[in-house]
Structure formats: structure tokens, C-alpha cells
Amino acid sequence: MLQVYGSHSRDQYKIYCYANGADDKSHERQVVKQTCDVFRETDMLTPLDTAQTIAADEIDLLIDTDGHHAFNNLEVLALRPAPVQITMLGFPASTGAKGVVDYMISDHVVTPLPISDWKGTYPGFSETLLLMPHSYQPQDWIFPTNPAEPVATRQELGLVPEDAFVFVCFNRNDKLEPTVFGAWMEILNRVPNSILWLFESHKSATANLIKTAEKAGVAANRLAFAPRLPKPQHLLRHKHADLFLDTLIYGAHTTTTDALLMGIPVLTLPGDTFASRVGCSLARAAGLHDFVVKSLPEYIERAVALATTDRPRLEAAKAELLERKPDNHLFRTKDYVLSMEKLLENVWRDWQTSGGKA
């Protein structure tokens, strides 16, 4: 969201931000504070006081970015401080809060609806969905690092041997489940000179993953684990990866865009839920239609082929991601905001013509 706030048209919009988390002194928070017209610290306020503040500001469209996350605003929203209330981005599912959250920003991939529609209803969602023309998720291509900054070597990162093919998945370990991990082990067994690079959430998770790999016939040294790093260093280490493998039930979201930003193609298998279809939404928005598969066997076969017989296809995708980055739908925040504003204008027009009913 970082570039979204400042990209709105000031001819039509005045942007208020209500920050309900404590000030962490971060660069990101300062960017938001500087690019909003009004920035209010509400972390010490009660939900009632926050709602009264929003109502006093006469907000027309109140946009929540948390859903059911830990810092969620649902108590505030339940007090209806604004005539139209929308949720987006933070929680990849319905809030279930009918009468509290009127709309949810989505797209035609994560919630498959007719492409000609700008809004619609979807099974399991209490909100009316507002459909972005590309991905629902904004992602700016500008990131806080110098691409020429020295990158750690493969050996320093534990990626050995030097000529190994590197499959990567930097998803949280709690997104890994037996089916996808079993598929990854089959892929590793079929691509001998390859390793799997995973995010290290916790030492016990690392130990369990190694134990499970060994039971599948994959040696412990073929799994590498990446500790948490500051965002710039984390992005730069992607340069040593070859192919990102998405998880199945709860797919990659931010980790998908990180990989695509750094020119790493993402192989993904969309499921039946919003959370399992985000990788597909992002890959398609980035132009990687060939990396979206329809079944688990196809997922395995495609991964094996891209690491062995179909390497030119993989290298071409990498080059295209990097060359087209400035023109890629996924990384054009200003275009994203223009599309978002069209949806907001339609919503506000509907509210006015309905006599004040969202």
C-alpha cells in the first residue's frame, strides 16, 4: 500500500489515515504520514473514540486494511462511523460482518466473476465485491535498496553446490502442509542437482521439515533455510533463486510479489478459495500465464521441466519480468489507484442514488 496514499487524485479525494498501531518509527510509517492529507494517531483511543473521530471528520468512504488480523478495526466499523465501509488487502477472505462491511476489493481471479462486471456477490462472502481489472493487490516496483549493492554469495547463504538449481518458497512455515511438501520432495528427487530454499520461521519447524524430507529420501543438505532479514537484503538475495514454488491451501501473497519484483517466476496452482488463488492473480497480472497450472501432477511436471529440459522457457520468463517491470500491470501503482478510484466513484454514485443505502 505504501505508494497508494499519495497517488490518489487530490482534485477528487482528501485522504485521511487512522493509525491504530503504535508508532514504530519506521520508514514506511513516515511515508504514509507524509503522503496522506490528514494522519491521526488512534492507537490509544477506544473503538468508540476512534469511531467518533472518524464521524467528526465526515468521512464518506472508510477503507479498512486489516479484516480479521490482530490489529483489526471491526469494533470501530461496527459503530458505522462512515456511510460506506470497505475492506481490502489485509485479510484474504470475507469478514463475515454483514451490515458492518459493505464492500471488499477483489479481482476476477481470486473471486472468479464475469470479467465485464465491476461488482458482484460471491459464495461465502458477506460483502459485495468490487473487482479490479488486474490484481486486487497493489505492489509498487520501487523498493528501498540499491540494486548495485553487494549481494551475499550462494555459499554464504547456504546454497550449495554453486551450480545447483534453486527452488525457493519464502512463505511462512505454517503455510506448508503435507501435500505441497510431498510434491516438493518428488520434484527434488527428480531433479538431482537441485535444492529447496525455505524461510526459517523457527528452529523446531526447520528440524521437522528436515526430518520429513529425509523420510522422503531427500538429504538434509538439500534444504537451505533463510533467516529473517531487513527488506532490502531480503529482496536482493532473491537473485540466487531460479523458480518460486507456491503453496496450495494458503498461497504466497507478498512473497509472490517480492519474487516477481526481483525477476523470479512463480509456479502456482490456484485452489478454490481467495487465499489459495492470490498467486494466480499476481502471476497473471505480471504476464506469467504459462506458470499457472491446473492440477498437482501438472505442477510437479512443470517444475521438473523448468529445472531440466525447459530451462530456456524459464530464462526467457526471468528476462521478461525484469525488462517489463516499469510497464508491468502489477507494479504500476498509479494505474492501480486510477482503477480503484473508478470503483469508489461507482460505489459513491450507487450510495447517492439509493437514498443513502450501501
Image (tube, grey):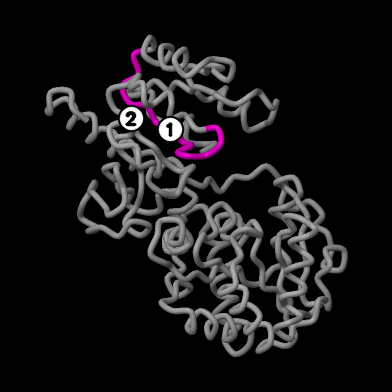
Residue flagged by tag 2: what amino acid is it?
Gln
Point 45% across, 72% down: residue:
292
Above/below status of 252 relative to 63: below
Regarding mark 1 in the picture, which secondary structure is present there? strand
Mark seen at residue 206: none
The residue shown at (57%, 86%) is: 305
Residue closer to the observer: 129 or 305: 129
Disc 1 residue type (three-letter): Asp
In the image, is residue 70 part of the stretch drawn in magenta?
Answer: yes
| Residue 184 percent coordinates (x, y) | 63, 77
Q: Where is residue 105, by image quadrant?
A: top left
Q: Earlier in the sequence, mark 2 or mark 1?
A: 1
Q: Are marks 2 and 1 in contact (CB under 8 Å)?
A: yes
Left or right: where 88 falls relative to 343: right
Q: On the picture, is 329 further left or further right than 159? A: left
Q: Is residue 215 left or right of residue 305?
A: right
Q: Residue at x 12, y 27 (%)?
A: 353
Task: Name the residue nearer the viewer: 318 or 23.
Answer: 23
**Along the viewing direction, whichever of 56 and 211 lies nearer the viewer:** 211
Tell me the tag on residue 64: 1
**Bounds of the magenta segment:** 58-71
Residue that mark 2 sits on: 85
Q: Residue at x 55, y 67 (%)?
A: 266
Q: Residues within 10 Å of mark 1 (few under 14, many from 20)?
A: many
